Amino acid sequence: MSTAIANHKVVSEKEWLKARLALLEEEKQLTHQRDALARKRRELPWVKVEKNYVFDGPNGKVKLSALFDGRSQLMIYHFMMGPDWPEGCPSCSFLVDHIDGAVVHLRQRDVTWLAVSRAPYPKIQAFKERMGWSFPWVSSYANDFNRDYHVSFTREEMAQGKAYYNFGTITDFPSEEAPGVSVFYKDDDGQVFHTYSSFARGGDILLGTYNWLDMGPKGRNEDGLSFPMAWVRHHDRYPDTGSASAKQKEAASCCSEEKAS
């Protein structure tokens, strides 16, 4: 148990409520600031996409304009999975574990969501099946999409510490692939515009698990790790002992035995 948890202040219900109401005022301020920031995000100018990007998907070649799937907004998650990688990045997998349930709701608001990686499509499909995901995911292996949107780097750039990432950050990035989000709009004439991109911790808000952890007494509990997400594993590589899935399997087994008896 950490010192902060062991020695945490304990007060009466009245004192707790006073402290909670004071924090509530700060939470409300943050909510209003977030709303204002979202409005400014929508007011950003756009850039017309001039390149004719063609991706590989489950039905063969598909153009960027077709990825909108009949909607006017396209949100792309740049999933870290390079051409030679045997599997996708655990941290990106952690993020997209939150996606399948959201995709159907996004579609109701004129938004198509999908993932893009540089790995060849057969590798993407095999990993997607292993993880049990259903969201759309295409390959940019045969185009410059990842390079143009600054989430893939050459070995030379990495060796020289000149990977352009997060709008000008020159860094010795530890991987040839980086995470990010890019958003596009298609008008009635079929023209496509780049409206927004976000990288690094800009994607924090998409991690529902972190939002839940931030409400708990221990928070993210990552102090002392080699890096913040060092604890994260592919969801099929956590120990099953005591997990919800193990308990569900046990319950299902008991139900089957009861029906058989």
Image: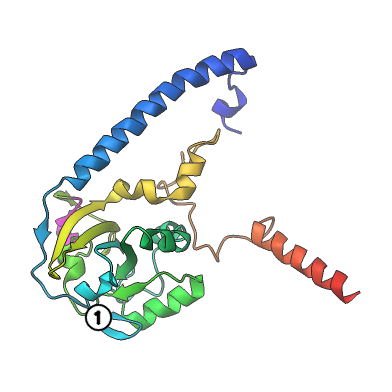
- At x 18% / y 76%, what residue is drawn? 143
The quarter of the image holding the N terminus is top right
Q: Which colour assignment does the render follow? A: rainbow
The magenta stretch is 156-166
Residue type marked 1:
Val
- At x 17% / y 55%, what residue is drawn? 195
Q: Position of residue 47 (x, y in %)?
A: 10, 58
Q: Nearer the viewer, residue 190 or 19?
A: 190
**Side of 119 where 251 appears, left or right:** right
In the rendered image, the vertical position of residue 203 relative to residue 96, given as above or below: above
The quarter of the image holding the C terminus is bottom right
Whether residue 79 is visible, yes or no, is no
- At x 23% / y 61%, what residue is drawn? 151
**Quarter of image, res 197:** bottom left
Q: Nearer the viewer, residue 101 or 125?
A: 101
Q: Position of residue 108 (x, y in %)?
A: 38, 60
**Side of 223 where 140 appears, left or right:** left
Q: Position of residue 83 (x, y in %)?
A: 29, 76
**Quarter of image, res 241:** bottom right
Q: Which residue position holds label 1?
A: 62
